[in-house]
Amino acid sequence: MKTAVFMGSPRVKGNTQLLLEEAVRGATEKGAEITLFELNKMNIRGCQDCGGCVETGECIVKDDMEKVYSAIRESSRFILASPIYFAGVSAQAKTMIDRCQSFWHEKYMLKRPLPQGPD
Ligand SMILES: Cc1cc2nc3c(=O)[nH]c(=O)nc-3n(C[C@H](O)[C@H](O)[C@H](O)COP(=O)(O)O)c2cc1C
């Protein structure tokens, strides 16, 4: 099963990475095919609320989110690991989540159900 994994902490070898590695180890033992995104190392702009996805459900901002969009479409499992920063997820994780607005538009406004993974 394809699994998209998001590392939302900027801290190398910190608590989030430690826990995430354990989760990935368990998933891999069960046959998961992992695609890892280290969000702090990626070039992902915040959502601009530009409306560029309204007509098509596709984000028009071209940056590293393009790889994330593809992986999300192809995956049937997801792991998001983030430290708690001021009672929320890290900025790195939140930025990625906000950019999923295009999926929201695709599903809820354009009424195009997102493809389900194989399992
Ligand atoms: C900017 C910042 C904000 C934080 N806010 C919270 C918080 O609201 N609640 C909490 O329990 N811990 C908070 N923490 C502590 C971190 O969540 C905690 O140290 C976490 O284990 C860090 O993960 P890491 O080891 O992957 O960096 C905060 C830490 C930082 C740097």
Image: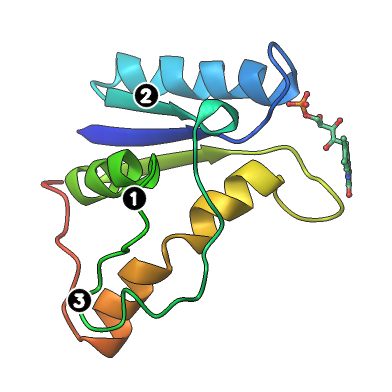
**Image spot of residue 118 (x, y percent):** 10, 46
Comes first in the chain, label 1 or label 3 = 3
Specify the farthest residue to the left: 118
Q: Classify 10 Å Cα crowding around label 3: few (below 14), some (14-19), many (20 and above).
A: some
x 23%, y 45%: residue:
70
Which residue bears the numbered disc 2? 27
Horizontal side of residue 54 vs 118, given as left or right: right
Q: Is residue 72 left or right of residue 18?
A: left
On the rendering, which quadrant does ligand 1 occupy? top right
Circle nearer the N terminus (1, 2): 2
* Residue position marked by numbered label 1 in the rendering: 62
Q: Quadrant of the N terminus?
A: top left
Amino acid type, label 2? Ala
Q: Residue at x 39, y 80 (%)?
A: 51
Q: Where 39 sits versus 74, above or below?
A: above
16, 96: nearer the viewer: 96
Q: Residue at x 30, y 45 (%)?
A: 66
**Element marked by disc 3:** loop
Q: Which mark is residue 56?
A: 3
Q: Percent x, y for residue 56?
A: 20, 76
The colour scheme is rainbow
Which residue is more in the foreground, 11 or 60?
60
Element at label 2: helix
